[in-house]
Image (cartoon, rainbow, N blue to C red):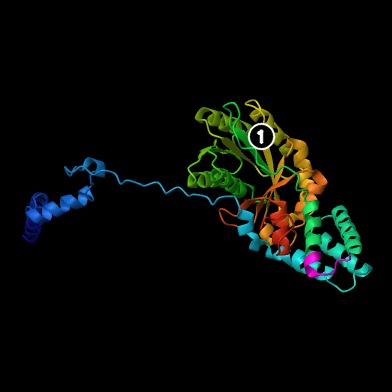
Amino acid sequence: MTEYLLIALALLGVLILGALGLVVPKLRRRPEPPLPREVETRAEEDLAGPPVLAPEAEVSTGILVEPPVIEAPPLEVPEPTAGRLVRLRSRLSRSQNVFGKGLLGLLSRDHLDEDTWEEIEDSLITADVGIDATRDIVDRLRERTRVLGTRSAGELRALLAAELVNALDPSLDRSLNTAPKDGVPAVLLVVGVNGAGKTTTCGKIARVLVADGRSVILGAADTFRAAAADQLETWAGRVGAETVRGPEGADPASVAFDAVKRGIETGVDTVLIDTAGRLQNKVGLMDELGKVKRVVEKHGPIDETLLILDATTGQNGLEQARVFTEAVNVTGVALTKLDGTAKGGIVIAVQRKLGIPVKLVGLGEGKDDLAPFDAVQFVDALLGTEAPGRDA
């Protein structure tokens, strides 16, 4: 009897387990109650991500908006070049210490003995006048003071000024050849070593030409530095001049050729070509400069080749001038940074050694601090007094 009872209980347990297996899956598949509308919308936004705005160009307000008008900066009017050297004479104050104070002080001594004349020679050599030019100046001063018996300060100043003006050779032609001929603009080629302030001086030369009534196109043939072309373009834009430039690394001769071609097409007076700065001892670079000259001359002869010299380089500048002259036949010198040096005698040395006239002098960092050179006015500024031959 007990055995039958145990069997019945086992069968009952199997039935109960089977019933549970059928019911539980149905409970798991029961659908969840619907979410509230606000919750459902928020869930859809989360899945879709942040809203994507239409581009501004596709959003129409119905109102026409004109682009802002950008006004061109007003053109600058450069200072007249006439009398600039007189106006800028104070910039030569450091050179005045050597010439005006040093030399005149020595010459004013009661007794001009051999030691005094040697001191005078040393002062001139220190001022970069050059040994040969110094000896000529001192010999002539000694003779004239002996013959004339000069002793007054005014007479000594006049004698010294006359000898310095004579050493600068006032007969040299210092005018810039900037006038067009037969419908072809005058071409000015600007050359120089690295660091002489060539591109800046080139921009100032453009202002000199505009101040003298010339229309100008600038050729940015320094293609090794993009900044040089940008700088030149800035200078040109201030006076309303056009700049012809090429891509960085372009053939400089090609850019120079295009600049002159553009000048012929537009009928300007002068084309000013800025070349890359180079060291005078680099044969390849000097040959390239010669190539620029030859290519430009396919349009016609170059009217002026200006060498930019840094006055602070002293006698080293003479070697620079000599090499550049051999490469491109330099016709004139623009001497920069004379305001920051006591070596004003380099003007005499350049002309004495090379026979090349100094045509422009830079006496400051201002836009119009480049002045046409005049021997009498220059000596006047050096000595701080009127030089002979100066108009009252």
Q: Position of residue 32 (x, y in %)?
A: 9, 52
Q: Which residue position is annotated with label 1?
A: 303
Q: Secondary structure at mark 1?
A: loop
> Residue lying farthest right?
114
Looking at the image, residue 172 lies above or below residue 120: above
At which x and y percent is residue 304?
67, 37
Quadrant of the image for the N terminus? bottom left
Is 283 in front, or is 357? 357
Q: Nearer the viewer, residue 282 or 133?
A: 133
Q: Position of residue 9 (x, y in %)?
A: 8, 58
* Residue occupying image coordinates x 67% and y 29%: 301
Question: Is 1 inside the magenta-drawn segment?
Answer: no
Give, as a single range, the part of the protein colored magenta.
149-156
Q: Quadrant of residue 175?
A: top right
Q: Quadrant of residue 303?
A: top right
- Residue 155: say if magenta: yes
Q: Residue at x 83, y 55 (%)?
A: 130
Residue 21 lies left or right of residue 369; in this view the side is left
Residue 113 visible? The answer is yes
Res. 253 image quadrant: top right
Residue 341 showing in the rendered view: no
The location of residue 137, given as percent across then percent down, is 85, 56
